[in-house]
Image (cartoon, helix red, strand yellow):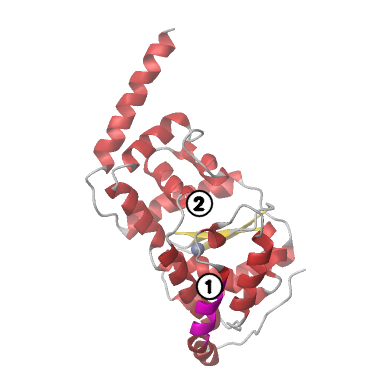
């Protein structure tokens, strides 16, 4: 009985604190968002099952390292291969990358994995996650999200598994987790990530024409399934394909000037 009276008061006061501390703050620095991402990433690593597939781990390591270098961004890069049937990958602000084992057989080649990681890394280098977070602040909803997530553990607020996994973090990091995993990037951001991603894979030494074939394979694999990050907010597959074809000459020039040429890289079985 005592508990029933106490809890609403705590919820109310924490919701209120959340609003007070976050609302009205218009800007968030790279350092702030990266610190929140790092907390969320540490939590993902602690709570996820890592893949023991040595061949795939080695491939993710070398592709992620090359894409990170090609981006020219001075992040504290990290990457992890998570054992999960999800056909997905992501890169948090500040260069924290995750690949799910379910993605590997779908991409089929090392170069296509480079196209996916190029796309994900581009979201981070173009500050798309930071923009999303800033938007949530300006909409004045983040204080409520943060306060609510702290108390309710995100079970009521979160749509995705990853969001639920991370809301125990509390505070701003929980707010970050919700904006990162539950809010889709805009179509413009997705298109920009495709464009930069194609250049990154080319500079990293992978044949950029594989990006077109990758997104065809991804489209076929996602038919009838819940869309993953990179299949979620896109214009039609034809539009994406047309864009990638239109940008390809620039990417081919970047590939010609790249210090190394791996072509399609190793096949993925
Ligand atoms: Zn994307």
Span colored in magenta: 238-248
Residue at (42% x, 49% y) in the render = 179
In the rendering, at what x and y percent does residue 266 appear?
72, 77
Q: Is residue 82 left or right of residue 254?
A: right
Q: Is residue 73 left or right of residue 113?
A: left
Q: Is residue 207 left or right of residue 30?
A: right
Q: Could you tell me how far apart the alpha carbons at marks 2 and 1 are, in whole angstroms?
A: 30 Å
21, 105: nearer the viewer: 105
Secondary structure under the numbered disc 2 in the rendered image: helix
User: Is residue 97 something that shows in the picture?
Assistant: no
Q: Assign the C terminus to one quadrant of the image.
A: bottom right
**Crowding near the residue tagged with mark 1, few <14, some 14–19, many ≥20 C-alpha atoms within 10 Å:** some
User: Is residue 60 something that shows in the picture?
Assistant: yes
Residue at (50% x, 91% y) in the render = 253
Vertical placement of 70 versus 188: above or below? below
* Marked residue nearer the N-terminal end (2 or 1): 2
Q: Which mark is residue 41?
A: 2
**Crowding near the residue tagged with mark 2, few <14, some 14–19, many ≥20 C-alpha atoms within 10 Å:** many
């Amino acid at each position: 009985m005592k508990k029933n009276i106490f809890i609403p008061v705590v919820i109310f006061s924490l919701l209120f604190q959340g609003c007070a501390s976050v609302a009205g703050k218009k800007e968030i620095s790279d350092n702030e968002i990266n610190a929140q991402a790092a907390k969320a990433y540490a939590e993902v690593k602690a709570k996820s099952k890592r893949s023991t597939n040595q061949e795939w781990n080695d491939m993710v390591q070398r592709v992620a390292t090359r894409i990170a270098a090609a981006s020219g961004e001075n992040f504290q890069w990290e990457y992890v291969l998570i054992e999960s049937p999800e056909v997905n990958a992501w890169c948090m602000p500040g260069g924290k990358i995750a690949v799910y084992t379910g993605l590997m057989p779908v991409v089929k080649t090392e170069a296509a994995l480079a196209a996916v990681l190029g796309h994900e890394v581009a979201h981070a280098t173009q500050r798309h996650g930071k923009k999303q977070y800033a938007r949530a602040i300006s909409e004045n909803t983040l204080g409520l999200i943060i306060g609510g997530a702290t108390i309710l553990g995100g079970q009521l607020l979160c749509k995705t598994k990853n969001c639920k996994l991370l809301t125990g973090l509390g505070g701003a990091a929980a707010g970050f987790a919700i904006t990162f995993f539950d809010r889709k990037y805009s179509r413009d951001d997705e298109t920009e990530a495709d464009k930069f991603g194609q250049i990154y894979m080319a500079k990293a030494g992978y044949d950029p024409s594989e990006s077109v074939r990758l997104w065809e394979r991804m489209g076929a694999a996602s038919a009838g399934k819940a869309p993953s990050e990179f299949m979620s907010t896109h214009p039609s597959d034809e539009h994406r394909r047309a864009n990638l074809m239109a940008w390809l000459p620039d990417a081919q020039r970047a590939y010609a000037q790249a210090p190394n040429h791996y072509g399609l890289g190793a096949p993925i079985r």
